[in-house]
Amino acid sequence: MPLHLLKLCVGAESISDLEGWIKQRLAAQRKLGQTPEQFHTTRMVPKRAHEIVAGGSLYWVIKGQVAARQKLLEIRPFTDADGIGRCHLVLEPKVVPVHPRPCRPFQGWRYLPAADAPADLGKGSRAIAEMPEELRRELRELGLL
């Protein structure tokens, strides 16, 4: 079973915000003649990287709920211009909504075992997947989802 990462999506108000940011970044890379690649930079390199890239995803916490995931393609350590070790989490640009689940704020990222990961929306839950994200969030907060 793959291992996943859980991370706060700081600044995003919704899944569509995250998707818009990804589209803008990929378009900017194309405009500069670069190969489009979506990645997220972190300070620390996951010590269990080999387990994560074997089918794991990065689960995003948006507005206090685990809301979506992106498949993790590669974990690429590097040293920045100041000599500080960092890491690029290379992600598939496709954002997959998941069954929302509350999550308290934390710093950095956390490991998320596959058994604890929320299921994707859409598979057997078409009606829920078609609801506006804000409505799903409210229903989840009321304990109705």
Image (cartoon, helix red, strand yellow):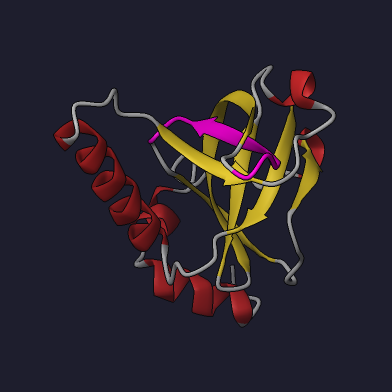
Residue at 47%, 70% (x, y): give it.
Answer: 11
Q: Position of residue 80 (x, y in %)?
A: 59, 39
The correct choice, above or below, for 8 with respect to 122 in the image is: below
Q: Is residue 112 visible?
A: yes
The correct choice, above or below, for 101 with respect to 97 in the image is: below
Horizontal placement of 125 versus 94: left or right? right
Closer to us: 117 or 30 = 30
**Which quarter of the picture shows residue 117?**
top right
Horizontal placement of 74 versus 128: left or right? right
Q: Position of residue 30 (x, y in %)?
A: 19, 32
Magenta-colored stretch includes residue 88? yes
Q: Which quadrant would the N terminus be assigned to in this image?
A: top right
Q: Position of residue 60 (x, y in %)?
A: 58, 53
Closer to us: 86 or 139 = 86
Horizontal placement of 125 versus 107: left or right? left
The correct choice, above or below, for 8 with respect to 75 in the image is: below
Q: Is residue 1 visible?
A: no
Q: Which residues are magenta?
A: 82-93
Closer to us: 123 or 116 = 116
Which residue is situated farthest in the left direction here? 31
Q: Position of residue 98 (x, y in %)?
A: 54, 49
Horizontal placement of 22 versus 119: left or right? left
Which residue is situated farthest in the right direction here? 47
Residue at 34%, 47% (x, y): give it.
Answer: 22
